[in-house]
Structure formats: structure tokens, C-alpha cells
Image (spheres, helix red, strand yellow):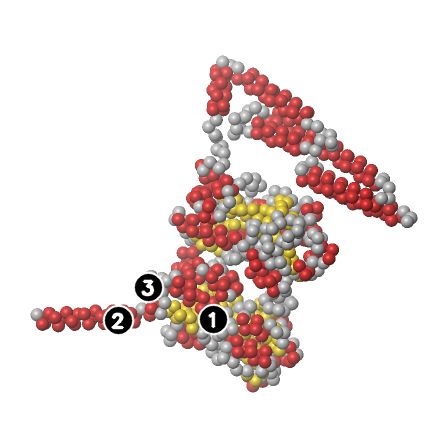
Amino acid sequence: MSGCVARLAVALVFLFGAFLSGCREHPAAKLVISTGTPGGTYIRLGEQLARILEANPGPDFGVFESIPSAGTLESIDRLVRAEADLAFVAGPVIARDPRRADIRALMSLYTDAVHVVVRRSTRISDLRDLRGKRIFVGLEQSGTREIATRVLKQVGIEDAHYVRADAASFDEAAALLVMGEADAAFFVAAAPAPAVVTALEDGCCQLLDLARHVDGLVGILVGLRPWQIPGHAYSQQRPVQTIGASAFLVGRRGLSDAFVTHVLGAVFDFVSELAVAHVRAEDIRLQDAFEDPLLEAVGLHTGAEAFRDAENEKLVIATGSITGRYYELGTRLQLVLAQQGIRSRVFHTDGSLENLRLAADPRRRVLAIVQYDSALASYWDPSLYHTARVRDEIAFPHITDLRRVAALHEEKIHVLVRREKIRERWRERPSLPLLSGLDVCLGPPDSGTQVIARALLDEHGVEPRKRLYLTVPDMVSRLNEGVLDAGFFMSHVPSQALKTVVHDPRNRLISIDFRNVAGLLGPALSASRIPPGTYGSQVEGEQPVDTVSTWAVLVAREGIPLDVDEITAALIQGAAFLGIEGGADTLARRLPSLPFHSEAEEQYRQAGVLPSPLPVDWLEIAWRSLAILVFVSGGIGGLVTIRRERTMRRFRKRIASVSTSPDYPYSVHDLLQIGQEIRECSLHSTWRSEQLDGSRTRELKQLVGEGIELSRRNLKRSLLAELRHLKEVGPEQVVTAKGFRSLEAAVWNYLEEGELDPEQHSFLLQAIRDGRAEAMSRISEVPV
């Protein structure tokens, strides 16, 4: 018995020892992320990634810790010694490090910029002026030091030619600059780097432009490239030329594929949370994460390869800024599709143009959220933007098989300006011309917003002092700081992405003058209005804001394997969760210039929100039955002819009854209504089928067209007669000016109601302006 007990005790000791041994073999109980120095960007992103991973643990791991480091070289040491599992590093530095054999790359993140900050009092204007100065070149074992010393050597400055200013972190180095204990400092970090912000904020320091040295500097390490610190990144007025280096997320070689896949999934699932830590997380994009050539030099982890290959099989949902409504819609749509077993990945992008280029890529299966006007420009051509400048300067991908899957929501262009920039003459009703001479953001560079903004400015003949192309967070930040005068943004009303600026009374929404944009209004853009009180920036008593609107639409290419029928069914079922006002009726909204995807259209028909091409109609059945009987009796031909002639006479009578007199303001409207009924009677998909044949339809359409032309011609003559009368009025200036304004307003109303065509409208406006000028000149000649 005692032997059994002894053997049982030995077994328990063995099992307990095996358990402890197993724990030691799985260090995932606490996984370590090596980041960077305080004042840099690696430390902020690393801390946030640790929080994300701990909140979303994998099956075998869940405790994460981020620890600061001197920089890339120290992080490499930690990975090699298994003191860290993941690290943020500079790509060009690790790509040449011999220890990289024990490290594997997970992905490229974004581009770090080489910042050279100098004290203004030192009058340093060139890298060569750093000779003999006190310089912070980064911490020992940092990528900053590796790059900084090579930069200095490239311009002939060796270690002995300057005094090294030592600091324990980027933050301390910034403090040395501000206190005058250092003349210059190198910071390799994504802009805006917190330490650089600190060094520049009181004005004693500035960024050094490296433009004259860039060509030589890109060769000091493989992977360095020309880069630009944007004019909006700090307080400097213009972009600064420098060099850039890819930032990588890497791991020790022994990490499991499952762990690496989980980490990468967390990065892209929660990239918006990473952006809370630093705005440059917006640049972490799946479409670019595995494209950097240096990844091959470091070696991509097999788990990263598996993740990349799996992601390539997923459906892509191309959206917009991670702070905007498109991205929010995309993430919700991803969840809706997942319930139907459709695996997808949301891409955050600059906007409609980038999304259309993704959709045009034959290697991808893409659902894209885009502005309706941009979709039409790709499907038809950019001529709908009217101005040659926009057509010639913006390259739209031409996608002949682009199709509409759903309409999502209406959105309007918001034009915000700082109130202190509004000159006195614009106080009552500010509009786009006041933007002349100001610094204006037109939207992100690949967005539909910037296309509309450029078209609107050109139509108004407005040239800002600077045209900036910024992401939405950057634009909002600069408006809040007062370093940007105005900005354009396309948004659903009310806008959530703009809430910090549209509710700020220091800003004001300004109007678009419809008289200047008649050439833009049409199938893609419509005249619209933002009512008073919509936003906090609209002060009581201020007039409503006139603007233009379009629709956000979900598009895909016809003929690629997308399961659009299942996607559309999921959209209809999840419309409430997606926040689609109007539900399925909105999704299937009639936007005829861009055809429906055939599978989507069929789903809407099955759901009953689009009419069936062959509706069950008892009148039609009765007519067909009668037709068969008449045919049997040999009288079909006469019956059809009689029916068509009767319909023909009825329409002729109605057309003739429409007054084309200029005193009747609805002539064109009534004739167009008759034309629509004629078209319906000529279709073979309604119960009215065969009421009109081709020849009769053409004759009636010609009569309608002649009536419209006559009505518009008569109206034009009447308006010209009124204009002549105004020109002959005596020298009462007030009466004359009011008369011209009233006539001009009438011309605009007639255009909006369709009673005048755009050509007649333009002719009359010019005639009115010429007449006003002539009348005013006569008035000025009358002796007082």
C-alpha cells in the first residue's frame, strides 16, 4: 500500500514538474513590446497596441507589456535575447543589421521623417553649418543615432567636428533646445513627433530644410527616400524637405504563426484606436503593409505571410478617413456580412478617388463607398464637372463595368471659415468669393471632396492663397488651432467627423452662390441647403447655408465574383443597424445615371422595393386574353390600330391644350409630364404596352419637343422685352437696380423649374448684366 502511495506521489511530482516546464515553454503569459523613447511615436503606439492586445487576447496569450527603449538597436538586442517579443524599429537600420537572422518582420507601418531642429539664434541654415555646434544625435543604440551620424558624415562632419549633447530621451533633447543647452537635434519619428512639437511651440527653434542634400542622403542607407514634412504638421508655414524611413513592426523569430496572425488582425481591426494614440496610425494601411521592398531583406514571418494571403482572399470594403462616416459604415457592413458568412476587410482610404482605383484593380474584389458624382465621372467621364481645369488635372479611373449596389445617404458640401477671416462686406451672407487670398483645405488628396471643392472654386473664379490637401483629422486640428483659414468637407448632415469645428462659434459655414454653379448642377450634384440651427456655429438670426449635395453610394464591378446577391440581401436585412434612413427604399433609390448591378437589382425586386419587370396585372391578363380571341377571329390588326390611334389623338389633344404663353409659368413642366406618359405607353413592361408603336411615339415626342422649344422661346422674348423696358426707365437709380435684381431672380427661378434651358439662362443673365451696366452708366451721366 505504501509503495502505491509512493508511486502516486512520484507521479504527482512529475505531473506538477511537467506543468511548470510547460509554463516555461510558453512565455506568452507575459508578452513584451519594445517601443521607443519618450517624446517619440513608437512609445505611444506601442503602449496603445499593448492595451488593444490585452483587451482582445488570443487563445494562448493575453498579458502584454510595453517597455520604452533607446530605439531600434536596443530593441533588436532585446528580441535576440528573447527579452521582448515584438518591437517597433526603423526599417533601413534593421535591414543592414547582422542580427536580423534572429528577427522576422510582421509588416511596415508608416514613414518616419528625419527632423533636424535648430535654434533660430544660431543662424543655422544648412547641414554644413552644424560643424562645431552642440548637437543631439539620438540615444546610444537608437536608429536616430545611426541615421544622424551618417547624415553628418555625408556633409563632411565627423564625430570630432561637433559637441555631442546628451539626453536620456527625445523629451529631454527638446528641453535642451528650448533652454539653449543644445544648438540642434535629430529626431527620427513620424510627424508630428511630440518632442518636436515641444521644441517648436515657443518659437525659439525651427525645422531645417534638407532640400539641397536630399539626393545624396538617400544613399547613406538602403531604404531611405526623399520625404516631406507637410506644412501643417507643425507651426512652420511651408513644407520641409527631408528624408524618410519606413517604420516596421517586427518580432523574434520563434513566435508562433497563430500569435503573429492574431497581432496583425488586432492592428487592422483596431487601427482607429491606434490613431487615438498618434494620428500617423492613419497611414497604417493593409493595402501597403506588405509592399515595402525592405521586408524581403529582413524576412517576413511565416505567420505574416499566412495573414497576407488570407486577407487577399477577403472581400475589400473601401471606405474613407477612420474618423468619417464612410469608415463607420464600412465597419458596420463588415459585421453585417460576417453574419451571412462573408469574410471582408475594411480599408480606410483618402476617399472616393482612391476607392475607385481600388475597385478598378483586377486583383481585388472590392465594394467601394464613393460619392455619386465621382462614380459617374468614372463610369461616363469627368466632363460633368464642367470646368476644363478639373477635367484635365484629375485622373479618374475609367470603369465601364462599374455598377451601383446601393444608395446609402445624402451628403452635402460643408465650407467652414474662421469668423475673424470674414471681411466686413461678407458679414451678412458670406459665400465662396471671400476665400480669395486665404489658406484653404480642399479635402484629402484622393477624395471626392477635393474634386468638388476645386470645381466650385473654379466656377466662382476664386483663387485661395494656398490650396491644401489634408486628411480630415489634420484639417479639423488646424482649424481648431487657428492655423488654417477655411476648409471643405463632404458629409452627411449633421456631420460627426466635424463636430468639434461645426459647433464652434469661432467658425462659420458659408454659402455657395447657385448663380455661379449652374454648369455643375445636374445628375450628380443638386442645389441644397443646411437649415439654421443645424450646428452650434450657426448663430441665431443668420441665414440658411446654400450648398450642393450628392449621394454616397456603394458600388462594385459587374462580372467579378462578389456574391452581390447575398451582399444586397444582407444590406436590406441590416439597414437599421447600418443607420440607413428609409431602409430598403433608400438602398434602392432611383439614381438612373449609374445602372444597378444586375444581382443587386434582382434582390431589390424580390424584396418588393423595385417593381417586377413582369408584374401580375389582371388588366394586362384580360387584355391579352381579349387579344387572343380577336386574333382567332382574324381581327387583331384592326383592333390594335384602333387602340393606337385613339391613344395618339388623346395625346395630341393634351399637347395642344398646354399654353405656351409666357404668362403661364408651367408650360414646360406640363409638357414634360406628358412626355413621360408617352414614354410609359411605349414600353412593353407595363399594362399600357402596345398602346403606341415606334412611329407614333416618335411623332408625339417631336410635338412635345416643339412645344417645349416654343414655350421657352416665348418666355425668353418676354423676359428680353421686360429687360428693354428696364433699360428705358428714367434715372431713378433705386427703382432701376431693384428691377434688374428682380428680373435676374426670375431668370434663376425659371431655370430651376425647367422653363428655361441652361443656354437661354446664360444668355439672359449676360443680357441683364449688360443692361444693368448700361442703365447705371446713364444714371451716372445725369447731372445732379
Q: Going 52% across and 76% down the picture, which residue do you hit?
A: 170
- Element at badge 3? loop
Q: Please, what is the three-letter code of the amino acid marked with disc 1?
A: Ile
Q: Residue furthest toward the left?
A: 1
Q: Please, what is the three-letter code of the amino acid marked with disc 2?
A: Leu
- Element at badge 2? helix
Marks 2 and 3, Cα distance to the nearest angstrom? 16 Å
Label 1 packing within 10 angstroms: few (<14), some (14-19), many (20+): many
Q: Identify the residue under disc 2.
A: 20
Which circle's residue, 1 or 2, is located before the other in the chain? 2
Q: Identify the residue under disc 1.
A: 43
Q: Identify the residue under disc 3.
A: 60
Which circle's residue, 2 or 3, is located before the other in the chain? 2
Q: Please, what is the three-letter code of the amino acid marked with disc 3?
A: Asp
Q: Position of residue 387 (x, y in %)?
A: 67, 49
Query: For the N terminus, which image quadrant?
Result: bottom left
Q: Residue furthest toward the top?
A: 633
Q: Going 64% across and 56% down the picture, which residue do you hit?
A: 508
**639 and 667: which one is in front?**
667
Q: Going 36% across and 67% down the picture, which residue do you hit?
A: 63
**736 and 198: which one is in front?**
736
CB atoms at circles 2 and 3 under 8 Å apart?
Answer: no
